[in-house]
Amino acid sequence: MATMADVARSAGVSVATVSHVLNGTRPVLPHTRQAVLDAVEELGYTTNTLARALVTSRTRSIGLAVSAISNPYFTEILQGVEAAALEAGYSLLLADPHDDPGHERKVVQLLHERRVDGMIVAPSADPRGLLAYLGRHDVPAVFLDRLVKAPETDGGPRFDQVCADSAEPTSRLVAHLAGLGHRRIGMVAGLPGLSTTTERIMGYRSGLAFAGLPYDERLLAHGDSESAGAEVAVAALLSQAVPPTALITGNNAMTIGALRALRAHRLSVPDDIALCCFDDFAWADLFSPRLTAIAQPSKDIGARAVRVLLERLAEPDRPARTLRLPCTFVHRTSCGCPSEEGIPS
């Protein structure tokens, strides 16, 4: 197996220069850098990650704890995280907390025991155990998608956060449906306790107020961020004496459940009921009618989380920050509009 010394001899440089090229620790002249990379390729040299970790106390790995298996939305976030980590020379260790606070605490500990340099976590609705563990062990961490209120103490843990806007885009969906003449607009909200659920309900209520419509708590149902829960929630909304004429679903999984419930009740979208959803997804424009949706910058959220974590590793004492990325209104036809033209993006 080729060594760093072999690479140095082949490239005609010092071992230190090889180290600077491979680790990016110091600028190297372009022709020298290329000579080293050519030697690495020719000799088939691979870095001894374990040995480097013993010397630097860094493994160049990131732990990612998101419910990517049970929540399809996180799949795109995972793609963004993976691409940004790879570009920065970091490997990725993935664990699925299944949105369960107890399991979340366990998988975070397992990732920590693998000596990751830092973590990116989509917190559960009850992140107290997560916060306690990260704070006690001083683990650099970035929360994505869902915000948490971490205690701020002198010298205490600082958690950066990256998410999309939730309230304003939801308000925009309400305004759009109200502009089409709907006066009973129902919402299927996510799991209580999640910041995304709270903010989207806030947006729903502010959208109603802006449109001059009263808030009716009977038109708000929780689908618990899952397809099955949304199916039950929509069935309950439709069973009312005066059911809603339009629905907004709080995430892509609940959109699927809502469509199942509407089909079970033999209701056609948008002829019998209009439908808009938070979260666009790959097959949203394959439905008939095509789904009007709020698209989150999922991949960008993942990539930004990696960059913010790397900045935290480089500057452990800098102030914590929260980044909110804008969403996009994707107008299609499930809202009841006759065409997709003429609607501002």
Image (tube, grey):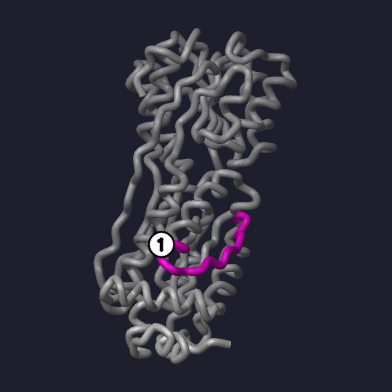
Query: Is residue 242 in sight in this rendering?
Result: no
Q: Residue at x 32, y 21 (%)?
A: 210
Which residue is located at x 64 percent, y 52 percent?
69
Dividing the picture into quarters, in which one does residue 144 lie?
bottom left
Question: Left of 1 or right of it: where is 32?
Answer: left
Q: How many marks?
A: 1
Q: Identify which residue, 8 or 175, lies in the foreground.
A: 8
Q: Which residues are magenta?
A: 85-99
* Circle 1: element type: strand
Residue at left offset 39%, top offset 36%: 327
Q: Quadrant of the C terminus?
A: top left
| Up/down of 286 relative to 128, above or below | above
- Give coordinates of residue 91: x percent, y percent: 51, 68
- Which one is in front, 294 or 132? 294
Residue 330: horizontal and vertical position, in percent?
45, 26
**Which corner quadrant holds the N terminus?**
bottom right
- Report the residue at 42% width, 13% height from top: 341
Vertical placement of residue 288 versus 131, above or below: above
Q: Is residue 213 visible?
A: yes
How busy is the neighbourhood of tag 1: few (under 14 within 10 Å), some, or many (20 plus)? many
Q: Is residue 322 magenta?
A: no
Q: Which residue occupies the foreground of this view, 297 or 214?
A: 297
Q: Is residue 89 magenta?
A: yes
Give the x, y percent position of residue 10. 43, 85
Tell me: 128 left or right of 157.
Answer: right
14 shown above or below 133: below
Q: Position of residue 111 (x, y in %)?
A: 55, 72
Q: Which residue is mark 1?
A: 142
**Residue type indicated by callout 1:** Val
Of 20 and 262, the residue lying toward us? 20
